[in-house]
Structures are given as C-alpha cells and as structure tokens.
Amino acid sequence: MNSGDVEVEEVARRFGEEVKRILGDEAVAVVAFGSRVWGKYSRDSDYDLLLLHRASEEKAEEAAVEAALKVSAELRVGVEPVVMSIFDFRGDSKYLTTKCRREGLIIYLDGGGRHYEAIDMILLAEEFLEIAEILLKHKKYRGVIDEAYNAAELAVKALMLWDGYDIPGSHGGIIGEFGRIYVLTGKIDRELGRLLSLSLEKRNKARYNARMEVSEEEAKTILEAAGKLIKNIKQYIKPNK
C-alpha cells in the first residue's frame, strides 16, 4: 500500500493560484483529497481538488474548469476539480465532506482566507439572531431557541476560525473545544460558556421533543445569551486585523 503523493501540494497550490487569479477574494481555499492524499493511488490517478468559494456556483465551476485545464497542461497531470461554497463545506455532514474537513489537505489562498470566512460567519450569526428576535415577537418560542443557538454556534465557529483552530464536526465537540480554548483559559467569561452549553441542551429538547413546553422566559434567556456571546466575540473579530 502506498501513502499520499508528495507532489499533491504543488499541484493544489498551482491550481489555487489560477482560481485566485480568476475569482480574486471569492476563492477561499483548495482542498486536495482522494487517493493522491489518502494513499492507494496509481500513476494514472487524477488529482482531486475541491475549490471552496464565495462566488456563484456557475462562476466557481467555470473558474475551476479553466484552472484545471491550465494546470493539467502545465504539469502534465490529470486534475479533477469540484466546487463547493465555503458555508456548505462547513455545514455539510456527508461522509466525503466530513473526511475532507478532517483529513484533506486544505490550502487557504492567502493569509486572510480564514479571516474572510470568519467575518462572513459572524455576519451570518447576526442574521440568525435577528430571525430569533422576530420569532420572539410572534411568540414562536421553540423557533427562538433553535435560531438563537444557531447564531451562537456560528459566532463560536467564527472565533475559532479567526484564531486558526479547526472546527469539530459535532455540536458537542464545538462546545467542548470552545470551553477548552477560551473559557478555561479565561479569554471568554465562564458564564457565557455555561449559557452556550445550556442553549444546546434547550435547543435539542425544543427541536426533537414535540411535547416539550417552551416558555417565553426560556426563549428570552437563550436569545439574550446568544446576543451577549456574539457581542463579546465581535470584539476579537475585526476586519483590519
């Protein structure tokens, strides 16, 4: 059995340079995966490369195909490109996507790649928080808890990305790493860490237990906790950093 191809990083970086030239900041990262990374490849195996982007799907596909053709001709190798938005990549639970997150060779296309992603993620967290506030006005308390937790978790992911940490694939894993890295070290207040854990517990019950009664007070508590957490995390995530 053979191990990964030592040349895969060069191919992925060259592909990344080309898509970066075409898409600019809308090209976030390239993930090399498949046999060239994980082993059991042959001389004729293609280089499987996943372009993570912030562009339209059509625009990203066109850029990936153009870059793959150029790199294939230059390096005389087969390049098989696929594309996925960065948000789908972070949220998708399918086996291959999860394996790429955990074991793929991820190459960010500039030093600020993770920072761009983190900023987008904190903006999305604020949007989910606004949705939760609207649901509260309409007394949809179960939905408030669900959306408020989503907002809080997005903010936590944004902070971890900003600081260069990998994001675990489960809700519990995210909370555990957040506690270890930020709460236990005193970077984030312990009460906010406790409220995040409480939010996940309430969210799971509200989402999966149809008989559970969700009070206005519980919904407000989770919503306020999410708001405090986002406000605190935004102090660390600044576009000019």
Image: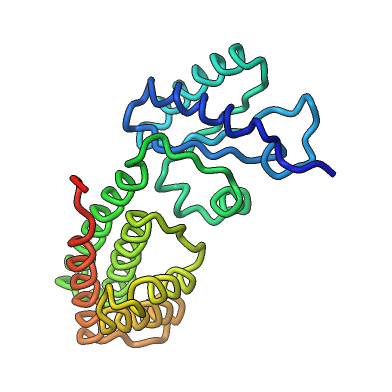
9 left or right, relative to 197: right
Q: Going by the picture, which residue comes out furthest to the left?
A: 137
Q: Is residue 118 above or below residue 182?
A: above
Q: How is the image coloured?
A: rainbow
Residue 156 in percent (x, y) is at: 33, 65
Residue 74 in percent (x, y) is at: 59, 13
Number of marks in the image?
0
Q: Residue at x 22, y 82 (%)?
A: 221
Q: Residue at x 23, y 71 (%)?
A: 229
Front residue (pair 137, 220)? 220
User: In the rendered image, which quarter contains the N terminus?
Assistant: top right
Can you tell which quarter of the image residue 32 is in? top right
Residue 174 in percent (x, y) is at: 44, 68
Front residue (pair 192, 133)? 192
139 left or right, relative to 179: left
Residue 179 in percent (x, y) is at: 39, 76
Q: Is residue 119 above or below residue 67?
A: below
